[in-house]
Image (cartoon, rainbow, N blue to C red):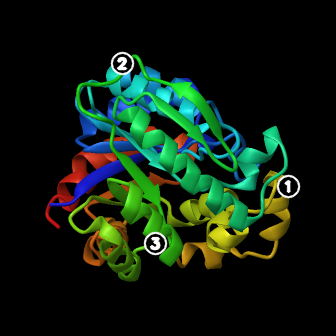
Amino acid sequence: MVAVGYTLMSEQTAPKQLVDYAVRSEHAGFDHAVVSDHYYPWLESQGHSPYAWSVLGAIAHATQRIDLMSFVTCPIRRYHPAVVAQKAATVGVLSDGRFTLGLGAGENLNEHVVGAWPHVRQRHEMFEEALQIIPPLLDGETLSYSGEYYDVPEAYLWDRPADRVPIAVAASGPASCELAGSYADGLIATEPDPEVIALFDDAGGAGKPRYGQVAICYGPDEEECRRIVHDQFRWFGLGWKVNADLPGPESFESATRFVREEDVASSIPCGPDLERHVTAFKRFVDAGFTHVAVVQVGGASQPMFLDWAERELVPRLREL
């Protein structure tokens, strides 16, 4: 049975509300909650972007059962890899072992705040070095490391959970799947692409968890849902090659100014029809994902969504 997840989207929700929604999602029956780690929202209309790791600490304390995950943290610019390992271990302790560290190569949107955004080839080299630093620290080793991009003269994590924090890596093609298969305990992908699953399996990922994410917009008025999706999620269709390099919300505004409401609504189910949302979720299940987190687009609609999810959506998804 696939694990049903809920997305705590920091770009559209204030920090206290994120903690509240995490607690409510646990009560609603979700198996896991994933938290985005941003410095900026994609679009100004989303309006938020708190520090994800403070939010994760609060959620770890406020919840009892639900698994938690960063979705995803970039360990190459804003955060040094050794510090990412420390943060992950601490949340692992606070959550009593319910935390998975989700990692990815990042976006200019969030990382340029500390300096220039590297070329894609350099980013991938930096990311691989980060993946050589973080696992040994989470394993309890005293690490000394000297690479092209990072130096760790000596580091040791004094507080770690009883079981090592697992790592999942975001991937979309052969090179990133090779990294995920080599270094990670799981795969992250945002498209229901069975080819990515196959590449991950071939690289050493067979039998490991595969985490996906599907965007929907539930609400009683389909037209209003379509408006919300266009207002807050029209960046989604640009693709990660574009999303990774645009520097700020104003760039995403410019890049999406000709995206129509119907363009966005054609790929994100909108409105009250349960089966349309189930169908979108099922694409990931059919592609081979073991964990799928739902994004409810629109910050203000989360309480209504969570009530509906408890009554209708989660029980229906458990039937898949």
Near-viewer residue (213 or 223): 213
Where is residue 268 shown, x and y percent of the image? Answer: 50, 70
Q: Circle 1 sits in a helix, a strand or a loop, which is it?
A: helix
Q: Is residue 251 above or below residue 268?
A: above
Q: Circle 3 sits in a helix, a strand or a loop, which is it?
A: loop
Circle number at residue 61: 2
Near-viewer residue (33 or 297): 33
Q: Amino acid at mark 2?
A: His
**Circle 1 residue:** 250
Where is residue 8 shown, x and y percent of the image? Answer: 47, 42
Circle number at residue 220: none
Comes first in the chain, label 3 or label 2: 2
Q: Amino acid at mark 1?
A: Glu
Residue visible at 33% across and 43% down in the picture: 166
Residue visible at 27% across and 30% down in the picture: 97
Circle number at residue 191: 3
Label 2 near label 3: C-beta < 8 Å?
A: no
